[in-house]
Image (cartoon, helix red, strand yellow):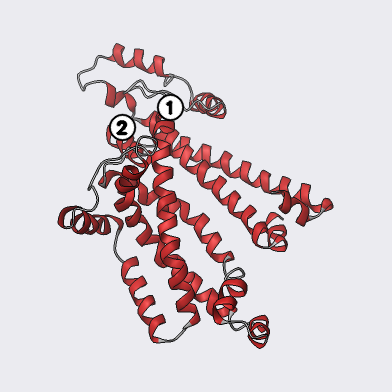
Amino acid sequence: MKRFIKAAGTGNAVPALARRAGHVLLVVALLSVATFLMLELLPGNVIDAMLSDNARPEEIARLQRELGLDQPMHLRFLGWLGNALQGDLGTSPLSGEAVSQAIAHRLPVSIQLMLLAQLIALALALPLGIWAGYRAGGTADRAISSAAFGVLAVPHFVLGLLLILLFAIWLRWFPATGYVPFASDPLASLRSLALPALTLALVEAPIYLRLLRSDIASTLREEFITVARAKGLSDLQILVRHALRPSSFSLITVMGINVGHLIGGAVIIETLFALPGVGRLLIEAITKRDFVTLQGVVLFIGVAFVLVNLAVDAAYALLDPRVGERHAR
């Protein structure tokens, strides 16, 4: 971040960062309003889930007063938003657990899953994308691109079921379901996340591969690459030292945007592989009609997505300070 500020210049750094922070605050404010209204306008409410169909009117009225549902919508929103700004996303009326605490307990599982999935996706996409871009139009490029399109067409849950069938049932290399905390047994934890992370990675890797392949092929036609070849540099040096870095901007952008895609995929994968993550918490809140937990989880996921994209903007400055300055503006 210091390099970002230095690169932007003394006169431009503060206004640029202030504008960017203002955009983030505006997005978060709109997100909070949309989250509250979206759930407020859904049919049914938490009262229906907590009481039986034969509940008496006085019981319904008492529970509405306890949950604050008898207040006008704007007062309920202001109260909910004020508590959320202090880290209090409410308490589930069904389980009695604080939503913030429920998210904190499950967040390490989701973070570990998505980080491992990103690492596997990059490990697959970087060498294949660089090679396909280097051999653009050749047999290897066509074979890699066709395979990438084929994998991309398969839904998350189908890939997950195929991987369970192959690696958990037939080969018995990895467990089909369950999660082992990383602190208790790192190796067992990685084994428990191997199949779900690979499932997510196989959906992300083709996107990264195709993007990197296109950028590498375009960069290799630039004049500075011709100069590098004239200096006698090897193809490997040209690809790694000169072509990869300017070809990574689009990849970093898509990685940030794909956080939302990863979260959506994690909801399915955590349910399929019985992982106690935030995605599974979201599904449980929906099935139980726990609107308080649902509001908190949706808001948390949205804010996390916005902050990750802000981090992506800062990452541009690490690759090229001039690009970082333009994005900050």
Q: Quadrant of the C terminus?
A: bottom right
As measured in the structure, the alpha-carbon distance from the residue carrying label 1 to the one carrying label 2 is 19 Å
Q: Quadrant of residue 28?
A: top right
Name the kind of residue labelled 1 in the image. Answer: Gln
Q: Which residue is mark 2?
A: 289
**Residue situated in front as seen by the camera: 152 or 130:** 130
Q: Residue at x 28, y 22 (%)?
A: 50
Q: Quadrant of residue 290?
A: top left
Image coordinates of residue 53 in percent, x first then y, are 21, 23
Determine crowd level at label 1: few under 14, some 14-19, many 20+ residues with C-alpha closer than 10 A: some
Q: Residue at x 22, y 21 (%)?
A: 52
Q: Secondary structure at mark 2?
A: loop
Which residue is denoted by mark 1 in the rendering?
101
- Whether 12 is drawn above or below 56: the answer is below
- Looking at the rendered image, the disc whose residue lies closer to the viewer, 1 or 2, is 1
Type of amino acid under label 2? Arg
- Between disc 1 and disc 2, whose residue precedes? 1
Total residue callouts: 2
Viewer-proximal residue among 18 and 117 = 117
41 above or below 164? above
Q: Is residue 122 among what the camera can see?
A: yes
**Image marks 1 and 2: residues in contact by CB distance under 8 Å:** no
Q: Secondary structure at mark 1?
A: helix
The one of 113 and 284 positioned closer to us in this rendering:
113
Q: Position of residue 252 (x, y in %)?
A: 55, 60
Q: Is residue 268 something that shows in the picture? A: no
Identity of the residue drawn at 49% across and 70% down = 211
Relative to 222, say whether 192 is above or below.
above
* Residue 282 point in image, percent of width and height: 35, 38
